[in-house]
Amino acid sequence: MSIREDLVASAVQFLQDPSVASSSVENRISFLRSKNLTQQEIDNALARTGAPPAPAQQTPYPQSGPPAPYYPPYAQQAWQPPPPPPRRDWRDWFIAATVAGGVGYGLYALGKRYVMPLVAPPTPEKLEQDKKSIEEQFDRAFSLVEQLAKDTEELKKAEQARSDRLDNALSDLEAVMSDLKAANRRREDDAQRVREEVQGLKDSIPKALNNQKELADTRLREINGELGSLKTLVTQRMSAPAASSPTAPLRNGTPASTNAPSGTAVETAPEPSAAASSPSTESPKKPWAPTTRAKPSIGGKAAIPAWQMAAAKKEQEEGGSSATTPAPAKVEDEPNASASS
């Protein structure tokens, strides 16, 4: 069976104890046996401590009679007298006194510092000091409250001013926005009106051009008609015989000429006569010829007056009668006036 070293080591420590060394070997062996150590382990422990080994047990011889009752051995350690108390010298008493003094002084300091202020009543000086400290704290608190109130009032005023500026800026912004909206609305209205006017002009210009073209065509047709009638009239006047037309007398050495019709009508000039005082100054008869006619006005409708047509018809009749019987021209004294142009 192997030896348990841990039990052997603990047994060696037990055997080396001074209080155990004074006991007998049997008591020590019995104690080790009670700790479940084998005989080999006990012998090893005793050998390590230098104690004599345990005596060998005598094997009992068998007896023929009944076995005697077994009485376990009483432990003799219970009756062993206690070991004598250790001796104390002056160093032990000095250390004990020093430790006791230090512990007492510490307890005294702790009690004086923490327990006494709680138990003992405060002194007047302490009360006055506490009062001053409390007043100082109150003064600081009141000053802080006043400063806080001033700061709050300043912040309130600044916030009010900022709110007023913000309201003014918002009102100005709203006014500017309303003005911009009104200007934009007016600009849109003007642009719409201009677009409508431009569209109206675009629609009316072709109509006006067509109307003007039609009016110009109508006037040109009227002018062509007037020119045709005038040409017919001039042709009729030119086709009359030269003998039937009256002669115009000389006035101041210059023959009087008839003027052409003005405007849109052709007028016949009256037959001039020579002066009564000088009948011998008559000029030779010349056939009547129309002068340069003025351009007709475009503003009104061109037409030959009825009196002019009657005068032309009358002259044609007189021209036909004078071709058969020529008669001298009647001389009338009338002022030198020309026909209206």
Image (cartoon, helix red, strand yellow):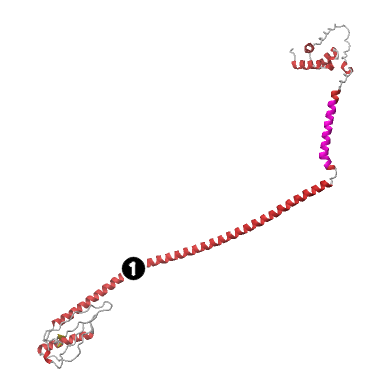
Of all residues, the one furthest to the bottom in this rendering is 277
Q: Determine which quarter of the picture holds residue 100.
A: top right
Q: Which is nearer the eye, 110 or 293?
A: 110
Residue at x 86%, y 13% (from the top left corner): 24
Q: Amino acid at mark 1?
A: Ile
Q: Please state, as top left, top right, bottom left or bottom right, where the N terminus lies in the image.
A: top right
Q: Is residue 108 above or below residue 312?
A: above
The residue located at (74%, 52%) in the rendering is 139
How far from the left and from the top, in percent, is residue 228? 20, 77
- Count of picture labels: 1
Q: Position of residue 65 (x, y in %)?
A: 89, 7
Quarter containing the C terminus: bottom left
**Helix, strand or loop under label 1:** helix
Which residue is at the far front?
A: 125
Picture coordinates of residue 235 (x, y %)? 15, 80
Which residue appears at 30% of the width and 69% of the height?
210
Counting from the top left corner in percent of width and height, residue 193 is at 42, 67
Q: Nearer the viewer, residue 68 or 319?
A: 319
Does the image show residue 75?
no
In the rendered structure, the answer to whether residue 51 lies left or right of residue 240 reads: right
User: Was residue 236 drawn as part of the magenta stretch in this picture?
Assistant: no
Q: Which residue is mark 1?
A: 205
Figure quadrant of residue 202: bottom left
**Residue 161 appears in the rendering:** yes
- Magenta stretch holds residue 98: yes
Question: Which corner quadrant of the image does residue 115 belong to?
Answer: top right
Looking at the picture, does residue 137 appear above or below residue 34? below
Crowding at mark 1 (Cα within 10 Å: few <14, some 14-19, many 20+) = few
Magenta span main SS: helix
- Observer-nearest of 249 and 65: 249
**Magenta range:** 94-117
